[in-house]
Image (spheres, rainbow, N blue to C red):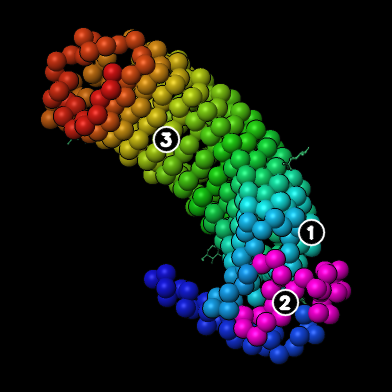
Amino acid sequence: MRLAAVLLLLGVSLGLCAAQRDDPFFWLSSLRSRGYPVGSLQADNTGGECPAECDCPPTFPVAMYCDNRGVKTVPFVPSRMKYVYLQHNQITTVPDEAFANATNLVWLMMHENHISSVGKKAFAKMTSLDRLYLSNNNLTKVPVNLPTSLRDLRLNHNKIAKVPPNSFQGMDNLTILLLHDNAIQDVGVALKGLSSLTLLDISTNQLKKVPESLPEALHQLYLESNAIDSIPTNFLGSFTGLQYMRMAHNELTDKGIPPNTFNVSGLVELDLSFNKLERIPTVSTSLEHLYLQANQIKEFSLGSFCSVVDVMNFSKLRVLRLDGNEISLQDVPTDSALCLRMAAEVAL
Ligand SMILES: *[C@@H]1O[C@H](CO)[C@@H](O)[C@H](O)[C@H]1NC(C)=O
Ligand SMILES: *[C@@H]1O[C@H](CO)[C@@H](O)[C@H](O)[C@H]1NC(C)=O
Ligand SMILES: *[C@@H]1O[C@H](CO)[C@@H](O)[C@H](O)[C@H]1NC(C)=O
Ligand SMILES: *[C@@H]1O[C@H](CO)[C@@H](O)[C@H](O)[C@H]1NC(C)=O
Ligand SMILES: *[C@@H]1O[C@H](CO)[C@@H](O)[C@H](O)[C@H]1NC(C)=O
């Protein structure tokens, strides 16, 4: 499947390159007019022109590798390029015209740079962009005018504090959004309408409440290491396929969790460790991993994960972490074994 895709790309791009190769002045003149130092490009006889600081393998002429080279400014990206690797460099700004001709990009990797400013039009023309990695940079806000074609957008490990409401507008195909390790206090309604989003990571930020208007299609919701003290009523009921929910290292109390919040089928993993819970919340018998370590839980309430009416409807829990609480082995009722028969790991 993957091989077939690569072969197809090669076939398409070879046609393009042949035409460009025949006209060296085409490149020179257009570069001069754009103010690029012409000496930095090499014309070769194989894959087409390539900036001196990058590698453009003739066998894969739509890819440009400029990662790990101490690059300080975005090199010229020829219009044939689809995959551009610029990660792990010292780029500080992405000017409006940086990718003026790179309108065919599908992947753009710019993580691990020092980017603090991005031009309003820098990414605007990339109508086929699928992956944009800007993690581990110095951004203080979500860049504007990001392509709506994005499926995988990584903005983690920056200093983002502001997420304007229209940041992700129209990104109907966005599936992965990583915003963790930033300085976000509130995402407002920015995530509303992301109908394809399945993975959302906003952990290690400064959220005081669960973001409102979260996309219904989420499978994985990561909110750990924030300052969230409560969960809205019927919160999980608004998702159609949520399987993993991580809220470790927050300020959750029993009072902040409405009854039956987690008693919903479908959930596979629930991490509520390192909070301020005093009771084990009721979870569905279908849950497989429950992390509750390092809370202030004082009693082992079997009814929280087992049906007291129907013993045959036993818990599917495989991992139950309760260590670092105020309960010990003596507090566990003897009939727990019947209900927790699937559990391979129970830590007290
Ligand atoms: C950049 O794109 C413009 C418009 O498509 C074209 O006229 C120009 O020749 C291109 N320049 C380079 C260096 O590819
Ligand atoms: C990050 O940006 C700030 C200004 O917002 C600047 O003072 C600092 O030097 C930048 N750090 C890096 C590593 O570029
Ligand atoms: C989403 O993907 C579909 C199928 O590839 C495509 O037709 C559609 O234009 C894409 N939507 C956006 C907003 O790019
Ligand atoms: C959990 O939900 C089921 C219905 O989905 C219900 O039958 C059961 O009583 C609930 N458990 C508790 C402890 O409320
Ligand atoms: C077990 O109980 C849950 C509710 O807690 C219910 O949805 C499910 O159908 C029951 N399963 C069986 C096998 O009775």
Q: Earlier in the sequence, mark 2 or mark 1?
A: 2
Depth check, mark 3 against mark 1: the one in front is 1
Q: Measured from the top left, where is residue 280 in percent x and y?
A: 33, 18
- Residue beneath label 1, please? 96
Q: Residue at x 31, y 33 (%)?
A: 289
Depth check, mark 2 against mark 1: the one in front is 2
What type is the residue that disc 3 sits on? Met
Q: Quadrant of the C terminus?
A: top left
Residue range of the region highlighted in magenta in the rendering: 28-54
Q: Quadrant of the N terminus?
A: bottom left
What type is the residue that disc 1 sits on? Asp
Q: Nearer the viewer, residue 35 or 311?
A: 35
- Residue beneath label 2, please? 42
Asked if residue 39 is among those painted magenta in the image, a careful observer would answer yes
Q: Measured from the top left, where is residue 256 in percent x and y?
A: 47, 19
Q: Is residue 331 left or right of residue 27?
A: left
Callouts 2 and 3 close, C-beta under 8 Å:
no
Q: Is residue 26 left or right of residue 265?
A: right
What type is the residue that disc 2 sits on? Gln
Disc 3 versus disc 1: distance between alpha carbons? 38 Å
Q: Measured from the top left, where is residue 253 in percent x and y?
A: 46, 16
Q: Earlier in the sequence, mark 3 or mark 1?
A: 1
- Residue beneath label 3, please? 245
